[in-house]
Amino acid sequence: MHTIHAVTGPIGVDALGTTLMHEHLMVGYPGWQAEAATDRALRREHVARCVERMQELRGHGLRTLVDPCPIDLGRDVELMAEVAQASGVQIVCATGLYKEDEGAGAYFKFRQHWGDALGEMTDLFVRELTDGIDETGIRAGVIKVATGHGRITPYEETVLRAAGRAHRATGAPITTHTDQGTMGPAQLDVLASEGVDPQRVVVGHSCGSSDVHYHLEMLDRGAMLGFDRFGLEILHPDRERLAVLIGLLGIGFERQLVLSHDTVWCWRGRPPKLPADLLPHWKPTYVFETIVPHLRAAGVSDEKIHTMLVENPRRYFAGEVIAARAAS
Ligand SMILES: [Zn+2]
């Protein structure tokens, strides 16, 4: 049986169970270190909040959560391990780097002048997937890449290429960030030029576009699409995400769609004050409490819902190729 690496150690892909493919225990924008003392003071509170959320999710049958926080976005794999241990929910963490405008690209852009940034990034990703992250012994199970709105910068292309090479070296799947439903097909182009089969890629935040043509272009190439920002209505309305999702399910693409929320549970540095009424549905139980009932009401079968929440994560991590494509 195929084995993947969770933050608490290896697990068989058949033990993944119901999986949320894109949530964050902790995020910190580069520069959060300026208020590192605040971050340290909140540590116990962060652990407690994450464990509480995980216990609530276990009540909905969740067995595994993928936290694709890249290296430079405040990733804290020891927090993840502590929360996984205390809650019993398996967590898969990522290697990889964030988009240029909100990541920490300065380091590798500096390296580019004096060395081989692509080779160094590739080595870093491979090391985190095989040996472990820093001194923790915790191994990443997935590779994260990201692009900004409407274009892929040269730096982001380097990250994509390094991810493709690390995937080829290790077999670990790739998950992406896209901005406002743009650049998904272009991400697949760069990855494909490095020999990556689109079936091993989740194009994240694809629900940020309501252009079905955009989705079909990627689905026809075999990619998995993330409808993974449910509840994040300041970026895109949930009813449009739902309308597109129901349509794609209706024409048989259930084997290429995964559901999540992209929630952030704790912030490194000083936590932002978000007005409570701004994002009333942005919580990691929303898919189970609200979206699944909406899908059922629209006639989507329990089997298709199971496929998206259980089967697709398993096949994605196992690297199983889909035999049949949807009818066109
Ligand atoms: Zn995210």
Image: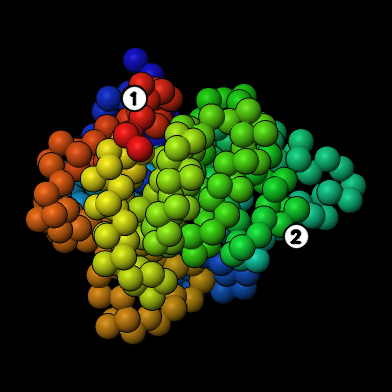
The foreground one among 256 and 285 is: 256
Q: Residue at x 48, y 76 (%)?
A: 270
Could you tell me if residue 56 is visible in this image?
Answer: no
Q: Which three-letter amino acid code belongs to the residue tagged 2?
A: Ala
Measuring from the top left, give residue 68's x and y in whole percent: 46, 48
| Residue that numbered label 1 is attached to | 324
- Disc number placed over residue 12 in the picture, else none: none
- Mark 1 or mark 2: whose residue is earlier in sequence: 2
| Residue that numbered label 2 is attached to | 106
Q: Residues within 10 Å of mark 2 (few under 14, many from 20)?
A: few
From the viewer's perspective, tell me whether residue 256 is left or right of residue 114: left
Disc 1 Cβ-to-ligand 1 distance below 8 Å: no
Q: Residue furthest right?
A: 114
Q: Residues within 10 Å of mark 1 (few under 14, many from 20)?
A: few
The foreground one among 116 and 219 is: 219
Q: How many marks?
A: 2
